[in-house]
Amino acid sequence: MSPFLKYLFGPEAYWLLVCVAMKLLGARNLPPTEEGSRWLENFWTWLPLIAVPLTFAALFTPGVSRGWLMARIALSAAIGVCVAAGVITGHIDYKDTRNSGVPMGWVMATIYGWAMIAVCSALAGIVLWFRNRN
């Protein structure tokens, strides 16, 4: 596989697409409405639960160095979940005192995302170890 293709279809590109998708979804809440802001809050939960585990699917593609790819996945997911949650947080506006708690959604999504990275890394490591053992 050429070096260009490694990054074109790698975890970095995946998280770039996730961040662009969050930006486009956040743009739907302009001007900010309460219903739109509540809808965007759901993505604080979906990012760690769906987007992070999907990153690890790249480990099961043939012809890649698993050790280096695991590091790329963990780093890109750690940065990507922070950026994507930040993009969503930037589009949430209730226009009242509830805005003071909105940044805690970013903190929650980031912490849950990092915890999911740790769990998925451990599970992927165990699966890859068992597959390579034979």
Image (cartoon, grey):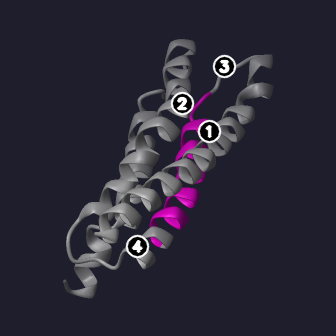
Dominant secondary structure, magenta: helix
Instruction: Count the marks.
Output: 4
**Front of the two marks 1 and 4:** 4
Instruction: Please indicate whether residue 124 sits to the left or right of residue 100 in the image.
Output: left
Which amino acid does the dot numbered 1 rest on? Ala
Gap in Å between the C-alphas at discs 1 and 2? Answer: 6 Å
Dot 2: few (<14), some (14–19), or many (≥20) neighbours within 10 Å? Answer: some
| Cβ atoms at labels 2 and 3 below 8 Å apart | no
**Front of the two marks 3 and 1:** 1
Sequence-wise, the earlier of marks 2 and 3 is: 2
**Residue found at x 54% / y 66%:** 75
Q: Answer above or below: position of 62 versus 27.
A: below
Residue at the farthest bottom position: 2
Sequence-wise, the earlier of marks 4 and 3 is: 4
**Residue found at x 73% / y 36%:** 103
Whether residue 113 appears in magenta in the rendering, the answer is: no
Sequence-wise, the earlier of marks 2 and 4 is: 2
Gap in Å between the C-alphas at discs 3 and 1? Answer: 19 Å
Gap in Å between the C-alphas at discs 1 and 4? Answer: 24 Å
Q: Which mark is residue 109?
A: 1
| Cβ atoms at labels 1 and 2 below 8 Å apart | yes
Sequence-wise, the earlier of marks 1 and 4 is: 4
Residue at the farthest front position: 134
**Front of the two marks 4 and 3:** 4
Gap in Å between the C-alphas at discs 4 and 3? Answer: 40 Å
Percent position of residue 19, x then y: 44, 50
Give the residue number, with chain letter if any, for mark 4. Answer: 69
Which amino acid does the dot numbered 4 rest on? Leu
Q: Which mark is residue 45?
A: 2
Q: Which mark is residue 94?
A: 3
Sequence-wise, the earlier of marks 1 and 2 is: 2
The quarter of the image holding the C terminus is bottom left
